[in-house]
Amino acid sequence: MTERTDVVELLKAQHTRIRDLFDEVANTKGEERKRHFHDLVRLLAVHETAEEEVVHPFARRNIDGGEQVVKDRIAEEEKAKEVLTRLDDMDTDSPEFLDQFTALRQDVLAHAENEERYEFAHFGSVADRGKLVNLARAVQAAEALAPTRPHPGTDTALKNVATGPVAAVIDRTRDVVRKAMS
Ligand SMILES: [Fe+2]
Ligand SMILES: [Fe+2]
């Protein structure tokens, strides 16, 4: 990613990273799986929140039929966040985890494809590259504000840094982004 990366390139690269992390979780076990899942949860929470605060509002205002396209995407995101929250409380080596994780992976990858096809594909015809580069900067700024969560197994020094459920990471990210943009 460079200074001149536009928002579509940025979000597609994040979709690729999300897809890779899903594979890494599926293909590992134990501590390693926990670590990959932890990274996936944070990336998804931050990515989806930045989309909801920065990208979807742009799409809603600018693309043809934007209202409905965005409504459908947000419904997909809400569903994914619910499953993610449930998974976050589960033992990552349990069969229930793998079942729900597999379903989530399908849903999230379908969601990313829907975004690329029905939403992002129209950006180039409603905004010039400069605008899309600025939007990418806004997404990156939003993501940089998101709280971090300590990795599982790291100890006390980090205990105060935004530990807690997925929902809290999402809420806090949304709050700081909204404050920064107001
Ligand atoms: Fe999304
Ligand atoms: Fe996305």
Image (spheres, helix red, strand yellow):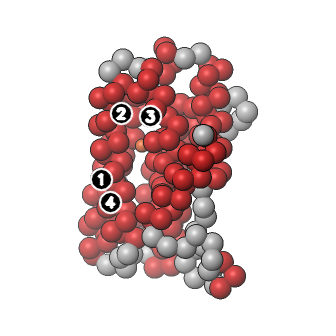
Nearest to N terminus: mark 3 or mark 4: 3
Q: Is residue 170 above or below residue 132?
A: below
Circle 4 — which element? helix
Q: Position of residue 166 (x, y in %)?
A: 45, 65
Instruction: Give the residue drawn at x 31%, y 45%.
Output: 76
Q: Amino acid at mark 2?
A: Val
Circle 3 — which element? helix
Instruction: Give the residue drawn at x 59%, y 16%.
Output: 128
Which residue carries the number 3 mark? 56
Which residue carries the number 2 mark? 70
Q: Which mark is residue 79?
A: 1
Q: Position of residue 71 (x, y in %)?
A: 31, 36
Residue nearest the observer in this picture, 11 or 172: 172
Which residue carries the number 4 mark? 82
Circle 1 — which element? helix
Write down the quadrant of residue 110 in the picture: top left
Q: Amino acid at mark 4?
A: Glu
Disc 1 under 8 Å from ligand 1? The reply is: no
Circle 2 — which element? helix
Residue nearest the observer in this picture, 179 or 1: 179
Q: Position of residue 104 (x, y in %)?
A: 32, 57
Write down the quadrant of residue 120 in the picture: top left
The reply to whether discs 1 and 4 touch (Cβ–Cβ < 8 Å) is yes
The reply to whether discs 3 and 1 touch (Cβ–Cβ < 8 Å) is no
Residue 37 showing in the rendered view: no
Q: Which mark is residue 159?
A: none
Q: Disc 1 versus disc 4: distance between alpha carbons?
A: 5 Å
The reply to whether discs 3 and 2 touch (Cβ–Cβ < 8 Å) is yes
Q: Disc 3 versus disc 2: distance between alpha carbons?
A: 6 Å
Q: Disc 3 versus disc 4: distance between alpha carbons?
A: 19 Å
